[in-house]
Amino acid sequence: MSTEAETVRHITCVLCEASCGLEVRLRGPEIVSIKGHAQDPLSRGHICPKGVALQDLHTDPDRLRRPVKRVDDSFLEIGWPEAIDLAADLLAGVQQRHGRDAVATYLGNPNVHSLGALTHGTALPRALGSKHVFSATSVDQLPHHVVAWAMYGHQFLLPVPDIDRARLIVLVGTNPMASNGSLWTVPDFPGRLRELRSRGGRLVVLDPRRTETAAVADEHHFVRPGTDATVLLALLHVVLAEDLARPADYVDGLEELRVAVADFTPELAESVSGVAAEAIRELARDVAAGEAAVHGRMGVSTQEFGVLCQWAIQCLMAVTGNLDRPGGTMFSSPAVDIVARGLIGRGHRGRTSSAVRGLPAFGGELPVSVMGEEMEGSSPAIHGLLTVAGNPVSSTPAGARLSERLAGLEAVVAIDPYINETTRHAQVILPPTGPLERDHYDLIFHTLAVRNTARWSPALFPRGEDQRHDWEIARDLVQALARKRGKRLPLRQWLRLRVSPRVAVDGLLRSSRRGLSVRTLARTPGGVDLGPLEPRLPDRLHTEGKRVLLTPPVLVAGLAALRARLPELRQAAESDDLLLVGRRHQRDNNSWMHNSSRLTRGRPRHQLLMHPDDLASRGLADGSLVTVTSEVSSLQVEVRATDEVMRGVVSLPHGYGHRRPGVRLRHAVDVPGVTMNDLTDPARVEGVSGNAVLNGIPVVVTAATPRAD
Ligand SMILES: Nc1nc2c(c(=O)[nH]1)N[C@H]1C(S)=C(S)[C@@H](COP(=O)(O)OP(=O)(O)OC[C@H]3O[C@@H](n4cnc5c(=O)[nH]c(N)nc54)[C@H](O)[C@@H]3O)O[C@H]1N2
Ligand SMILES: Nc1nc2c(c(=O)[nH]1)N[C@H]1C(S)=C(S)[C@@H](COP(=O)(O)OP(=O)(O)OC[C@H]3O[C@@H](n4cnc5c(=O)[nH]c(N)nc54)[C@H](O)[C@@H]3O)O[C@H]1N2
Ligand code: SF4
Ligand SMILES: [Mo]
């Protein structure tokens, strides 16, 4: 053991959107402990098991520190100059042979959790100049961006529930007790919920599963997957029919909205969703009484009517006067305001579209559900792929099929620290430093936080000589791509790429109206408290004349599609058919933290959850192996009987199933479980945004005979 004295350091956890401030005790280079930082003005001491597991990630022997290139079926370490040159050669080669659009980029979720990826990584797709840019956004929250763009004039004007002052919180298809919140940076959700309760407030949950969050709620309603739009529109219907609307004077379209939702009665909603009409009426009145916030996430974003659901929620908040009021849903006032400063574009729809299905791009990205089909056929559009912090084989619909297509591409390059389900197909992998080796400032999650704070998180450890930060990789690859084309980067771009993320953030802070700097923040470990959320409308709106638009035609049009589906939804509600939904566990992190035994030990949690009556009616035994068959594929998994899911619904966790040839995750491959996205269908997308439908998948469950493997 080292005899060095202990030092205490404060950093941000970047593993989920809660962005907790952590207190790390070090003895020399050794981590003695990781705890929540009690003085942190945002996270107030919160930590979850994943935060503690940051040390496992740091020391994981499978985490790549040097680039590797594939030689036959194995990977060999190579030097950085060779690796960058090889990556540029592969990508530029495909573009030379097949044109610019022939190389696709897929940007995965950890990009938004990495400062360097945000400040420098975006230069990569720009340098490639292909229309084929995909990201995890379209298997996640694209409906939110489309609705914000249409109603508020900017895709990133996303209001968050002001839980610290609310009287009523309604959560639809989201489980923050496990996920710690999404598009809602709400660290210490359990503590904030306790405080809500002690003020006499209430939590209501709508979910087809009695989740960890539903279990601590005051009221939980089972809702049949894919039918929430009828419930949310019925809430609006009641508010408008009972004359409870109190919109602010910058809200346009109330009368059109009244007409548009007139037929969506609580009785109609009950007939397809199973939520009692009387409960909908009471909830609508309670929301209208003020200091109420409704928030919907994965369960209502990644489903057939995702845009309608998010539209109805925003309308409900605006119409009841809960939008932009303390205790309702509010916009943040971050120190670095990425919206006001134009660091993220307003959004645009349909400037390009995909070749095979003609799905429209949004904000310069095509829906990832079309990525696979653009790689196949006699004259495929895509011949090469660059993945940056993404695992689309696990995370996007029909991942198993995508995997086969990746194997046939001319070039696959990955910027990623692991050899996993996706990156095993790469010819070269460029691994960036990990979360403890790099500086961080939350450009995204301060913007979605329940309190205005600003926190600088310095690297805990220096990067090794032979490691590179993600921003250095982006810088070098952009330059190498230009070289391959015989061009030099324009001076301004060259200069911008050489500025470190720290210097970039410092500039943004110094020029902000708060007048901060990295140095001032560094003096305040845990960050500067800038106070509770403040009303920001109508100033913050980006629409013409600064109006909230309740009835943009692109959103209203979705009602017709829902009306057309109602007869089928009614029929389905009475049938014995099964719909598959997803779930998350507190100790999982999408598809990529199963190599930490600290997170995977304990009771297995990979099973298909199924109601005991549904098991009985099929003659299936609890704990047995079953075959789950969807429209695209089938798989085998153990089933667990539980009345925590409603009848007619089965649930599988997302991000499991690592046992594939070539995956180099020595612990994760033994974690039981299957990949839910082997069952999801890229043909099923939400009609306006093209977001993947990952919840409410029709499946058949039958008895399985165990396979020999
Ligand atoms: N069926 C189903 N599918 C889903 C979901 C679901 O609920 N159900 N959820 C969806 C959601 S919400 C999301 S966000 C997506 C996630 O989809 P993805 O972003 O594609 O996948 P992740 O599992 O987050 O994998 C992250 C990858 O980034 C790498 N990585 C980790 N940290 C870094 C880093 O700092 N830099 C770099 N360069 N790489 C890094 C990891 O090794 C891993 O390969 O999955 C979606 N897919
Ligand atoms: N521990 C942990 N935390 C995470 C992650 C993780 O993998 N693990 N991932 C992070 C990421 S990238 C994200 S995007 C967030 C997501 O955070 P959440 O939005 O909380 O996501 P889930 O936990 O998947 O919860 C989705 C819920 O929707 C329900 N559901 C499914 N279909 C329907 C439906 O049709 N209607 C309704 N009303 N409900 C439905 C499911 O039963 C489930 O309870 O979590 C983040 N935090
Ligand atoms: S809740 Fe999220 S940010 Fe906080 S410690 Fe856990 S993983 Fe990290
Ligand atoms: Mo996500």
Image: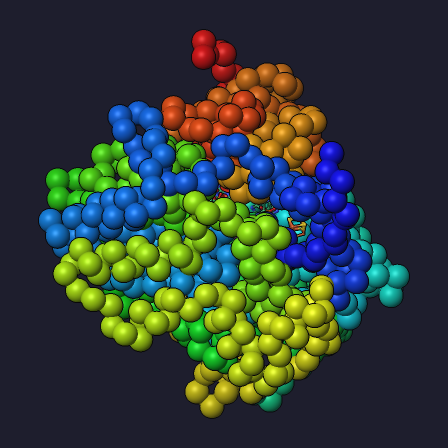
In this orientation, does residue 607 appear? yes
Determine whether, in the image, residue 516 is placed left or right of residue 407.
right
Nearest the viewer among 185 and 640 is 185
Determine whether, in the image, residue 159 is placed left or right of residue 354.
right
Nearest the viewer among 310 and 192 is 192
Nearest the viewer among 391 and 522 is 522
- At horizontal 50% and vertical 87% (from top left) the residue drawn is 546
Q: Quadrant of the N terminus?
A: top right
Determine whether, in the image, residue 126 is placed left or right of residue 419.
left
Percent coordinates x, y for residue 76 in the rendering:
34, 31
Percent coordinates x, y for residue 677 in the rendering:
44, 37
Q: Quadrant of the C terminus?
A: top left
| Colouring style | rainbow
- At horizontal 55% and vertical 17% (from top left) the residue drawn is 625
Furthest residue toward top: 708
Percent coordinates x, y for residue 691 in the rendering:
41, 54
In this orientation, does residue 311 appear? no
| Rendering quarter of residue 18 | bottom right
Q: Is residue 589 above or below residue 338?
A: above
Percent coordinates x, y for residue 126 in the rendering:
29, 63
Q: Is residue 479 above or below residue 576?
A: below
Determine whether, in the image, residue 568 is placed left or right of residue 378.
right
- At horizontal 64% and vertical 57% (from top left) the residue drawn is 12
- At horizontal 77% and vertical 47% (from top left) the residue drawn is 5
| Image label count | 0
